[in-house]
Image (cartoon, helix red, strand yellow):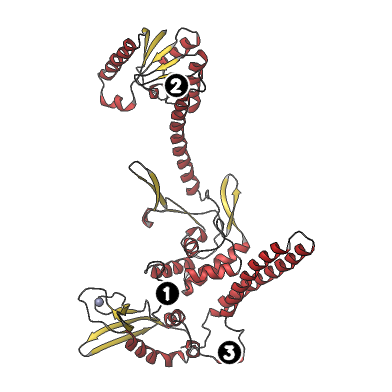
Amino acid sequence: MKTFLYLRKSRAEDLADSAGDTLRRHREALEETARALRLTICGVYEEVVSGEDLYARPEMLRLLRDVKNGLCEAVLCMDVDRLGRGTMSQQGVILETFKEAGVRIITPQKTYDLRDEADEDYTELQTFFARKELKLIKKRMRRGLERTAAEGGYLANAPFGYEKTREGRLPTLRAVEEEAAFVREMFAACARGESCAAIAAFLNACGAKPRRSAAFSRSAVAAILRNPVYTGEVVWNRRRFLRTGGENASCRKAENPREAWLVAPGKHPAIVSKALFSLAQKRLDAHAGPPAGKRELVNPFAGLIRCAGCGRLMQLRPRPNRPGGYLLCETRGCCRSCGFEEAAAALREALLPLLARIPASLPGEGADEERRRRLLRDAEKRLAVRRERLCELLESGVYSPERYEERLRILEEQEEKLREQLSRLSPVRSEAALALTAADALRGASPAEENRLWKLLVSEILYRREPGGFTLEVRLRVLPDL
Ligand SMILES: [Zn+2]
């Protein structure tokens, strides 16, 4: 078998030695292999330049020419990597030429026969090259992505509220009005202090559908509220992929710190204002305390009472085996606790007279309520149409009675959710309703509702422990018309 050596340094070796030691060592190793396999070496191709490009590798070109002319039957090299490099098409040229001539590639570890298509080695070789190429493509894509983002384009899947479009060559987004209305409502509700779970319930009752699941969850709502894309910005470098080591190596997504995010003005329209977005972020930050599953708010003054000593928020803690709780400053040794009910009663007593002077619907609330009502009414209309259509499908025999029953049940569940949300809206305001005060509204309110009310009125409450008792200093927000 007419065998030739192909010698070439890798880039790393290039930097490591300049005296040609590497090539000499490789040559010795390959000659050793040839002896072991009883091959006679007919010649040597020694690449002295180390360009990545095939056409900058004269010895490889000479080898290919010789292979084509049938002068060579096997090539000995240190590893397939030495033959590879360059672009996929260039590697293809090398592989195809070798394959057509039936030339074997022999490395100290393995012999590759490219002619045998079924040969696993060949597949392995292909994947080896493909893997290298993939890396290159990924790198190129990443650069492309960053350039697109810097120009304000948007490449990922369109988020809820938008659909993909193009502006010239640049991919970007355009608002989908039906969804955008829900997005605006979500941000407004969040800014009002509603929980993500409550917002999700509202959206589901309206029949709004997220992109990749059947219904909105608390976390899906949070993800939307956290996405700056809705203010008309594009953000990249938000996440990085961590490779975990070990046998079961896998990738894990991790959020980069906000400082590392790259933000550019997008070409797409904003759905919410920057002011509303940042207000929602503040609410979300404030809510991101207790772990999931423990979110039932029992403290109507949550987020309002601070320790005057250290400035931290006082926490409501249950008393073991006793009803009621106590207010705790979490700083060790800062100040003594007090009974929660005692503090709450004092606060209500001080604040209720103020509430009596505020009309039940605060400035700005009317518009919010109106928008909510409209979204729910629209959903109601859609459901009515669906009910109608369902009857038609039964009558025309498209649906069997069982199928009809099943669909009807789903529809009625949806209607029930909708009614529940509608019942939460305050009745359409009449003269009598206007006479209602916030104090009236407080009667029968849940801790969360009461909390919402106090947050509108109070900016903070300072807790001071003094000998023989405690004081609560209430700082009010400046409200118009008060
Ligand atoms: Zn403290």
Q: Nearer the viewer, mark 2 or mark 1?
A: 1
Callout 2 secondary element:
helix
Q: Which residue is mark 2?
A: 54
Q: Quadrant of the N terminus?
A: top left
Q: Quick check: marks 1 and 3 in contact, CB under 8 Å? A: no
Front residue (pair 111, 140): 111
The residue shown at (48%, 16%) is: 98
- Alpha-carbon span between mark 1 and mark 3: 30 Å
Toward the front, the furthest residue is 402
Return the x and y of residue 364 as percentages of the image width and height. Answer: 53, 78
- Quarter of the rendering containing residue 30: top left
- Alpha-carbon span between mark 3 and mark 2: 83 Å
The residue shown at (52%, 70%) is: 199
Q: Is mark 2 within 8 Å of ligand 1?
A: no
Q: Is residue 426 left or right of residue 474?
A: right
Q: Which residue is mark 1?
A: 296
Q: Quick check: marks 3 and 2 in contact, CB under 8 Å? A: no
Q: Quadrant of ligand 1?
A: bottom left
Q: Which residue is mark 3?
A: 433
Return the x and y of residue 447 as percentages of the image width and height. Answer: 43, 81
Q: Nearer the viewer, mark 1 or mark 3?
A: 1
Q: Nearer the viewer, mark 3 or mark 2?
A: 3
Q: Is residue 180 left or right of residue 139?
A: right
The earlier-in-sequence mark between 1 and 3 is 1
Q: Amino acid at mark 2?
A: Leu
Q: Amino acid at mark 3?
A: Ala
The earlier-in-sequence mark between 3 and 2 is 2
